[in-house]
Image (cartoon, grey):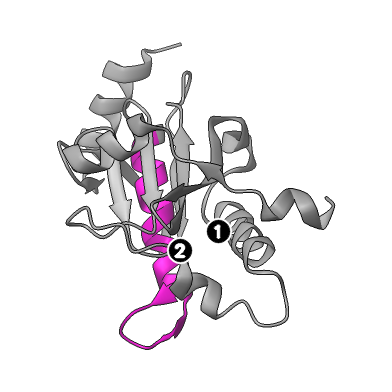
Amino acid sequence: TDGNEMEETLQAPKSIEEVIVNGENNQVEFKPALVYNFSTGRGGIGIKAIIARAICGFLNTNGGLLFIGVSDGGEVQGLSHDFSISGAKGPKDFFLLEFDHMLKHFLPFSIRSNVSGDFYKVGDKEIFVVSVSPSKRRPIFLNAQEGKEFYVRGQASTLKIVDVEEIAHYCLAKWGTG
């Protein structure tokens, strides 16, 4: 990719701003950062795990939009915190590499066609909007530290389902018996 492509940021259509104003729901989730940990002031894989869980939940439910750079309360914070730890790399290149790393680390490769993202400008701040289409044929499990985990999207949060029987019932109801 040439450097010029990475510097382009799409102006957010009014519909994106309206989605933010309407808040989180079954198909909308806000996260303040991809890598930046506000507690430590540094990057951390734990933050990426939170993003991966949200994507996994959308994959296993009805899909959705994940806004990175927006607080839980719907305040557009932008990506300056993530960009601040990019080091010598260009901030957007750094962000996209970290996003790809997060997908590769936590989710199966087969979901790549279900997940896409773009940078958008809302006012004078940049955000990253991830569009997730639902998995059509099978459940998607998160590669977590302790093994595989299963997530679905609730009304305004991502829910971890741990009971094997519940996971089986959910999967059969959603994807059938094949």
Task: Name the residue: 40% across, 65% down.
Answer: 33
Outermost residue, bottom side? 40
Viewer-nearest residue: 32 or 167:
32
Label 1: few (<14), some or many (≥20) within 10 Å? some
Picture coordinates of residue 71 (x, y %)? 26, 60
**Image vertical order of residue 83 relative to residue 14, above or below:** below
Secondary structure under badge 2?
loop
State the residue position of label 1.
102
Task: Name the residue: 31% across, 19% down.
Answer: 174
Viewer-nearest residue: 122 or 54:
122
Q: Which residues are magenta?
A: 34-58
Viewer-nearest residue: 150 or 91:
91
- Identify which amino acid the numbered label 2 is placed on: Leu
Task: Name the residue: 66% across, 49% down.
Answer: 8
State the residue position of label 2.
34
Picture coordinates of residue 128 (x, y %)? 48, 50
- Identify which amino acid the numbered label 1 is placed on: Met
Query: In this view of the protein, can residue 60 be seen by the observer?
Result: no
Q: Which mark is residue 79?
A: none
**Image vertical order of residue 80 relative to residue 144, above or below:** below
Outermost residue, front side? 124
Q: Are marks 2 and 1 in contact (CB under 8 Å)?
A: yes
Picture coordinates of residue 23 (x, y %)? 18, 42
